[in-house]
Amino acid sequence: MPQLEASPEIDFHSETYRDAYSRINGIVIEGEQEAHDNYIQLTELLPQHKDELLRLSKMEGRHKKGFEACGRNLKVTPDLDFARNFFAQLHHNFQSAAAENQVVPCLLIQSLIIECFAIAAYNIYIPVADDFARKITEGVVKDEYTHLNFGEEWLKAHFAEAKADLEAANRQNLPIVWRMLNHVAADAHTLGMEKEALVEDFMIQYGEALSNIGFTTRDIMRMSAYGLSAA
C-alpha cells in the first residue's frame, strides 16, 4: 500500500478535529477491547484452538494500548460511552450466539465483520493520520490480517456445514455495519476519511474473505447487498 503524506490542511490540534477524534479514538479502543474479549470467549467454543485464540486476544490488547497512546499524544480523552453504544448491536448478537454455542455467527461477527471493518478504517486512516498515529496504525493493520485469516481458515475448513449459518448471520449483521458507517461518517470526514472510501475498502476486504472461505462471486454479490441501500 503506497504511503501518502498527511493532508497539509488538517489541523490535528484544532478543537473540531480533537472533538471528532475523541469519538473515533473511542471506537478503535473499544473495538480492540471487544475483539480481545471475543477471542477469549471463543476459547470456550473452540477449545482445540485455545492457544491461538489467546494469542490473538493478547495482540488486540496491545493494539488497544497503542490507540490509547494515540489519544494521549493529541491530548484527547476517548469517548468510550459513545463507542460502547456504537458496538452495542454487534456485541449483543455475538453474546447471544455465544450463549447458544453457535460458533459460525460468532466467527462471522468477530473474524470477518469486525476485522474487515477495522482493516478498512485503518487503511483509509493511515494516509491522513498524524505521524505518531500513523506508525501505530501501520503496525496494527498488519496484525489484523492474521486475525481475519483465523476465521477464514476455520470457516473454509467447515464450509459445507457452515454455509447456511454464515448466510443467515450475514443477513442479520451486515446491515448493522452500514448503520455504523453512517453513524460515524461526519466524524470520519473531519479526520479526512470519506465514507465512500470506507465502504469500498470494507466491501473489498469482506468480499475477499467470503471468497477465500468458499463462496462464489454470485453468492458474494448477493450477500454483500444486504443493507447496502443504507450505506
Image (cartoon, helix red, strand yellow):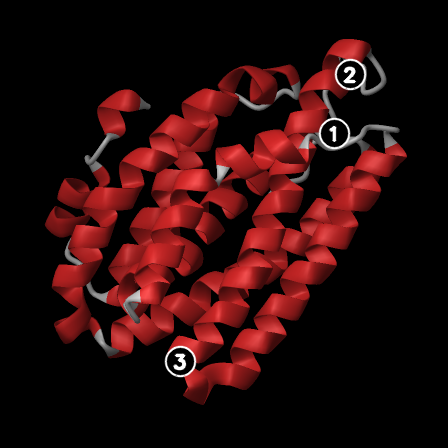
Total numbered circles:
3
Q: Position of residue 58 (x, y in %)?
A: 67, 69
Determine whether the residue tagged by mark 2 lies in a helix, strand or loop: loop
- The front one of 219 and 45 is 45
Determine whether the residue tagged by mark 1 lies in a helix, strand or loop: loop
Q: Amino acid at mark 3?
A: Leu
- Asked if the residue under mark 1 is in contact with the one under mark 2, i.e. CB atoms within 8 Å, the reply is yes
Q: Earlier in the sequence, mark 1 or mark 3?
A: 1
Mark 1 closeness class: few <14, some 14–19, many ≥20 residues within 10 Å:
few
Which residue is pictured at 69% across the width and 46% down the height?
137
The answer for how far apart the CA atoms under marks 2 and 1 are is 8 Å
Q: Which residue is mark 2?
A: 8
- The front one of 82 and 203 is 82
Q: Amino acid at mark 1?
A: Glu
Q: Position of residue 173 (x, y in %)?
A: 29, 44
Evaluate whether residue 125 shows in this view: no
Which residue is pictured at 42% across the width and 22% down the height?
182
Q: Which residue is mark 3?
A: 46
Q: Is residue 62 above or below residue 191?
A: below
Question: Would you identify the image quadrant in which residue 124 lies?
Answer: top right
Q: Amino acid at mark 2?
A: Pro
Evaluate whether residue 172 shows in this view: yes
Which residue is pictured at 62% across the width and 53% down the height?
33
Q: Position of residue 79 (x, y in %)?
A: 69, 30
Q: Which residue is mark 1?
A: 5
Mark 3 closeness class: few <14, some 14–19, many ≥20 residues within 10 Å:
few
The answer for how far apart the CA atoms under marks 3 and 2 are is 47 Å
